[in-house]
């Protein structure tokens, strides 16, 4: 009985992999053609059975990755693919522009500095510059965190309206990682208001015990927060006496990066 179940699972997995490979082949084929292709052409060039091609095309069209001309039946790449490519290029450009500012923060504070963006309601670290000290924080490129427990996360959502914050609250249920983590919506809203007021966010042992982080929002010309830059260290390193100075360094770096992206000089954010 167990063997039959395993074989069935393996067969299903192989079929799923094959479907993914075929879908990618179709996208790559359309990317290489200047004119659109019919279902029959795609089936022939991609070496995919016509029935499977029709099914995959319907899915890709439905998700916006392929466009089908209603009159000619020809298929071309959809706007969703172009959007993904643009977002990827934007992310690469943002990292390149941000690195000098991260290095400046490291030079001024001696702490690890990082850049994060908001993706599907989570803070994702996309760049990191290590500080010179022996103590290293558990932050790496690609790490995803719920936004309410991290300084970069709070900076990323500080400009969202209450409805959007509430949606994130309900999605993540604000599960505490430490005893200091925020677990109520009113407290989170108050913390985001304070973040906007001072220009930077604080994670005071909310994501990890004995770890403190500071981050500031990076703004786009339209006023939206597109990223956050910040630092992390131990509570002993970022003491209460040093917190305001470190916050000022991070906030100033975020303002300069925002300026490079087209934001007029001045303190980012709204009160």
Image: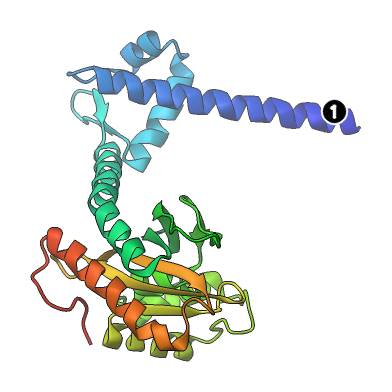
Determine whether 31 is above or below 245 in the image: above
Quadrant in the picture for the C terminus: bottom left
Q: Nearer the viewer, residue 77 or 229?
A: 229
How far across and how far down the image is residue 158, in percent? 33, 77
Determine whether 103 is above or below 166 in the image: above
| Circle 1 residues within 10 Å: few <14, some 14–19, many ≥20 | few
Can residue 249 be spotted in the picture?
yes
Report the label total. Answer: 1
Can residue 224 be spotted in the picture?
no
Determine whether 168 is above or below 107 in the image: below
Name the residue at 42% across, 26% down: 24
List the residue tagged with mark 1.
4
Q: Nearer the viewer, residue 24 or 55?
A: 24
Name the residue at 80% across, 31% down: 6
Secondary structure under the numbered disc 1 in the rendered image: helix
Name the residue at 39% across, 32% down: 58
């Amino acid at each position: 009985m167990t063997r039959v179940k395993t074989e069935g699972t393996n067969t299903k997995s192989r079929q799923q992999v094959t479907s993914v490979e075929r879908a990618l082949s179709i996208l790559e084929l359309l990317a290489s053609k200047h004119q659109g292709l019919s279902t029959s052409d795609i089936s022939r060039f991609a070496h995919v059975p016509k029935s499977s091609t029709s099914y995959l095309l319907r899915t890709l069209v439905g998700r916006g990755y392929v466009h089908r001309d209603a009159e000619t039946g020809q298929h071309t790449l959809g706007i969703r693919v172009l959007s993904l490519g643009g977002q990827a290029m934007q992310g690469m450009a943002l990292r390149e522009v941000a690195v000098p500012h991260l290095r400046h923060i490291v030079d001024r504070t001696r702490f690890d500095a990082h850049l994060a963006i908001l993706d599907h309601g989570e803070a994702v670290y996309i760049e990191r510059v290590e500080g010179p000290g022996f103590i290293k924080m558990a932050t790496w490129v690609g790490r995803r965190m719920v936004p309410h427990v991290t300084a970069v996360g709070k900076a990323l959502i500080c400009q969202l309206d209450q409805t959007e914050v509430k949606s994130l609250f309900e999605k993540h249920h604000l599960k505490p990682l430490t005893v200091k983590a925020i677990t109520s919506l009113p407290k989170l809203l108050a913390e985001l208001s304070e973040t906007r007021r001072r220009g930077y966010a604080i994670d005071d042992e909310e994501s990890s015990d004995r770890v403190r982080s500071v981050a500031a929002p990076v703004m786009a010309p339209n006023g939206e927060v597109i990223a956050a830059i910040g630092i992390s260290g131990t509570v002993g390193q970022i003491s209460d006496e040093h917190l305001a100075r470190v916050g000022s360094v991070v906030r100033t770096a975020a303002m300069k990066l925002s300026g490079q992206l087209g934001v007029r000089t001045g303190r980012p954010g709204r009160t």
